[in-house]
Amino acid sequence: MFGWAITFLIIAIVAALLGFSGIAGVATNIAWILFVVGLVLAVVFLVMGRRRPPL
């Protein structure tokens, strides 16, 4: 997830430098959503990984 978020962030930066504000805004929103989803999944997997295995 974080790799895709960084990819879209780079696309947004390049688009903003070239003057494509619409594409830059969309890419920024996608990067933000992927970053938040990645953080949520990381927290969920961190919590789920702390359980003891069944006997």
Image (cartoon, rainbow, N blue to C red):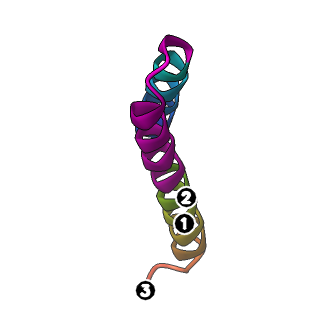
| Percent coordinates x, y for residue 27 in the rendering | 43, 38
Q: Residue furthest bottom?
A: 55
Dot 3 alpha-carbon crowd within 10 angstroms: few under 14, some 14 to 19, many 20 or more: few
Residue at (41%, 43%) from the top-left corner? Answer: 26
Tag 3: residue type?
A: Pro
Residue at (48%, 40%) from the top-left corner? Answer: 25
The first of marks 1 and 3 along the sequence is: 1
Tag 1: residue type?
A: Val
Secondary structure category for the residue under label 2:
helix
Q: Quadrant of the C terminus?
A: bottom left
The reply to whether dot 2 and dot 1 touch (C-beta < 8 Å) is: yes
Q: Nearer the viewer, mark 1 or mark 3?
A: 1
Q: Nearer the viewer, residue 42 or 18?
A: 18
Secondary structure category for the residue under label 3:
loop
Dot 1 alpha-carbon crowd within 10 angstroms: few under 14, some 14 to 19, many 20 or more: few
Is residue 19 highlighted in magenta?
Answer: yes
Secondary structure category for the residue under label 1:
helix
Provide the residue span drawn in magenta. Answer: 17-34
Q: Which mark is residue 54?
A: 3
Q: Which mark is residue 36?
A: 2
